[in-house]
Amino acid sequence: MTKDELIIYIKDSLRAVNSLPYSVSDEEISRIIDLAKRFFYLHYLEATEPHFYIIPKNIFQEEAFKKTRAVILPDCVVAVNEVREVNASSSIFGIRDKDITDERFIASELYAPQLTGDGFLLMTVRMSFWDLAKVFLLNTVAFDFNSNTKKLSFIGHTPKRDVYIKAFIKIAEEKLFDDFYFISYCIAEAKMSLANVLSLVKYKIPGGLEIDATTMYSDAKEEKEKIIEAITDKWNPPDFMILSHD
């Protein structure tokens, strides 16, 4: 859905839901959509997707970096989750294999027959080995990221090797405009905006009926709060649902 199509959809929803001959201007709805985009990109997990960047080591030797100790990431970046310095060595404890991954360990646990020992215990030992191996492969780099300026600042030592960045970037606007929560949020905001306008003057509809702008506003506000609660809960699942191995 394009932005123009979303504006039309919101205006039609206001007229249909409230059965009113009034609506909100296109400019106001456009403003609501723009503000909602910023909120959703920062607080809604489904509005972003993981992405990876590699910064070549020569960047850290340039004068521009030495002055600011920072690099500017693309505008699509919303957050940075991890920054690590990639080790040049491909050997761990004498094992020369670049395909040493936790997924590979799990696969071997599932498909390779185990002659001795408990399977889960063996998998735990392998995962512990992977934790130790990552210390030799990737060195964590302290950083600070500003989502407004897109500036990634390096704190501490200057990286001497290529740097791996795990970030979250915005999904395409058209995909966000199709999202149920985003559409509902914008409609709720538009209802609140319309209620504010109608409360300034005692508007009446044909038949002499008076519009209850206060109820319209409170209902829209409650709907908005439910949407915010729903999307933020996606960031905070129950502890028993989290299975992480970093």
Image (tube, grey):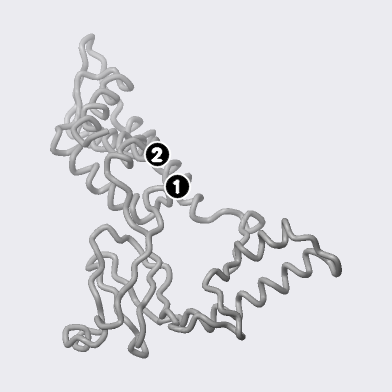
Task: Provide residue 151's location: percent of width, then percent of height.
Answer: 25, 72
Please name the residue shown 81% across and 64% down the image: 114
Task: Provide residue 58's location: percent of width, then percent of height.
Answer: 26, 83
Q: Quadrant of residue 10?
A: top left
Dot placed on the residue nearer the N-terminal end, 2 or 1? 2
According to the picture, the residue beneath numbered tag 2 turns out to be: 181
According to the picture, the residue beneath numbered tag 1 turns out to be: 231
In the image, 198: left or right of 167? left
In the image, which disc is placed on residue 148? none
Please name the residue shown 21% across and 27% down the image: 8
The answer to whether 171 is drawn above or below residue 82 in the figure is above
Please name the residue shown 28% across and 52% down the image: 38
In the image, 238: left or right of 65? right
Task: Provide residue 211's location: percent of width, then percent of height.
Answer: 27, 23
Residue lying farthest to the top in this orientation: 207
- Rate crowding at label 1 as few (under 14), some (14 to 19) or many (20 or more) other CA atoms within 10 Å: some
The answer to whether 221 is drawn above or below residue 85 in the figure is above
Q: Mark 2 touching mark 1, by CB under 8 A?
A: yes
Task: Provide residue 108's location: percent of width, then percent of height.
Answer: 69, 62
Q: Give SS at disc 1.
A: helix
